[in-house]
Image: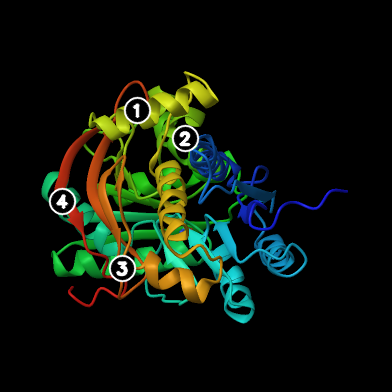
């Protein structure tokens, strides 16, 4: 075996997104966003002349696999950077491992906030960047009575706790709250729709994730509810879930997120064109793809500057890095390790993409502990 020339070995990084299991529908798209950015960087000559090489494992939507594979990456594979995790339970499983081994996890997913780790860069939305504006919009447009439906794990329970508090501040009420297993079957959602009808809410706030999202929206459609009167509102239902449930089922429902495909700015137009060329004309980008994509570019910009994969050297530079992302200008927040992101509210159209009905017009500073609220 020939030894590579000193200084020309590739930069190796770990990638942990599920390609199988209940959240593969969205994690697979985060993997694509990651690979697209890596391929762009390598096509441009790599980072300081060195190629970026991902070591990719499939944790199969199981938090125990996330923990085991994160440890494997940081020890046996010898990497220091991991790009991955969708569910908050998988992030919570990886957190003590990156802290113990001093790795850096790049987490491209909206979550419930109330967390800080010097070993995580958070590039998805915190509650002040989606839930607060969404609560205002929904109460103003549809009314103050909310039915909360979630998958049964930490993100939905904590996100609903925040929504309940935001509603209380807006003189709203929670008329029902129900959690279903991540592996819940369609029949369970059909039964739940009877309970929803009895409670007569103005809005269903869904924190259901992954495959079960499809069953919730299909059960809603079968029950004959009207999205103009009582839509489902979510922080997680993206173009990917819409495609799986069928655009006709998704149409009219509401999602709050920093990004939707087709924003119309030049960055997004070229990003989506490259995504379509690489993965298929019928494949849509979404806000999880976009965060997975831009965080690789933020990482690459910081690495180009310090030329070191040591998290203690790289992280301080990451915390001063900004980037022209498809959603608009973003910057990592020095104080929290979260990201300045845009707030947008979208209504699903008949083609499964979103029409933006409200937007912040500028990046919103992350406030993961809702101190300002
Ligand atoms: C999530 O579990 N943070 C979507």
Quadrant for residue 344, please give it.
top left
Quarter of the image for residue 363 reads bottom left
Cβ atoms under marks 2 and 1 closer than 8 Å: no
Secondary structure of the residue carrying numbered label 1: helix
Q: Tell me which label, 3 or 2, sits earlier in the chain.
A: 3
Q: Nearer the viewer, mark 4 or mark 3?
A: 4
Mark 1: give few (<14), some (14-19) or many (20+) Cα within 10 Å.
Answer: few
Q: What's the coloring here?
A: rainbow
What distance separates the C-alpha of mark 3 from that of mark 2? 25 Å
Q: Residue furthest right?
A: 1
Mark 4 or 3 closer to N-term? 3
- Sequence-wise, which precedes: disc 3 or disc 1? 3
Whole-angstrom CA distance, mark 4 to mark 3, is 24 Å
Q: Which residue is mark 1?
A: 270
Can you tell which of label 1 and label 4 is closer to the viewer? 1
Label 3 Cα crowd, 10 Å radius (few <14 / some 14-19 / many 20+): some
| Up/down of 85 relative to 353, above or below | below
Q: Which residue is mark 3?
A: 162
Percent of width and height locating residue 240:
47, 35
Residue of label 4: 362
| Among the 4 quarters of the image, the one containing residue 358 | top left
Q: Nearer the viewer, mark 3 or mark 1?
A: 1
């Amino acid at each position: 075996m020939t030894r590579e020339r000193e200084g020309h070995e590739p930069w190796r990084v770990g990638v942990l997104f599920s390609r199988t299991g209940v959240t593969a529908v969205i994690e697979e798209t985060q993997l694509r966003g990651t690979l697209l950015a890596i391929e762009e960087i390598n096509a441009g000559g790599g980072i300081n002349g060195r190629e970026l090489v991902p070591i990719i494992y499939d944790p199969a939507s199981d938090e125990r696999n996330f923990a085991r594979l994160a440890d494997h990456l940081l020890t046996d594979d010898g990497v220091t950077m991991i790009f991955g995790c969708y569910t908050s339970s998988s992030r919570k499983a990886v957190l003590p491992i990156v802290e113990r081994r001093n790795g850096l996890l790049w987490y491209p997913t909206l979550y419930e906030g109330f967390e800080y780790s010097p070993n995580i860069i958070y590039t998805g939305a915190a509650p002040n960047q989606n839930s607060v504006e969404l609560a205002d919009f929904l109460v103003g447009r549809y009314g103050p009575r909310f039915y909360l439906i979630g998958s049964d794990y930490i993100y939905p329970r904590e996100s609903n706790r925040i929504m309940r508090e935001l509603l209380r501040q807006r003189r709203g009420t929670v008329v029902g709250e129900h959690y279903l297993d991540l592996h819940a079957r369609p029949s369970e959602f059909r039964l739940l729709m009877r309970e929803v009808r009895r409670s007569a809410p103005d809005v269903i706030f869904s924190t259901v994730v992954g495959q079960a999202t499809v069953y919730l929206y299909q059960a809603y459609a079968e029950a004959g509810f009207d999205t103009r009167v009582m839509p489902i509102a979510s922080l997680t239902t993206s173009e990917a879930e819409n495609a799986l449930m069928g655009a006709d089922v998704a149409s009219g429902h509401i999602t709050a997120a920093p990004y939707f495909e087709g924003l119309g700015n030049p960055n997004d137009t070229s990003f989506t064109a490259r995504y379509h060329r690489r993965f298929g004309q019928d494949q849509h980008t979404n806000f999880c793809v976009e965060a997975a994509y831009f965080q690789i570019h933020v990482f690459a910009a910081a690495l180009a500057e310090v030329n070191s994969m040591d998290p203690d050297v790289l992280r301080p530079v990451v915390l001063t890095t900004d980037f022209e992302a498809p959603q608009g200008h973003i910057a990592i927040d020095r104080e929290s390790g979260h990201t300045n992101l845009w707030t947008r509210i979208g209504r699903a159209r008949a083609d499964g993409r979103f029409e933006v009905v409200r937007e912040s017009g500028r990046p919103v500073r992350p406030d993961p502990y809702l101190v300002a609220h």
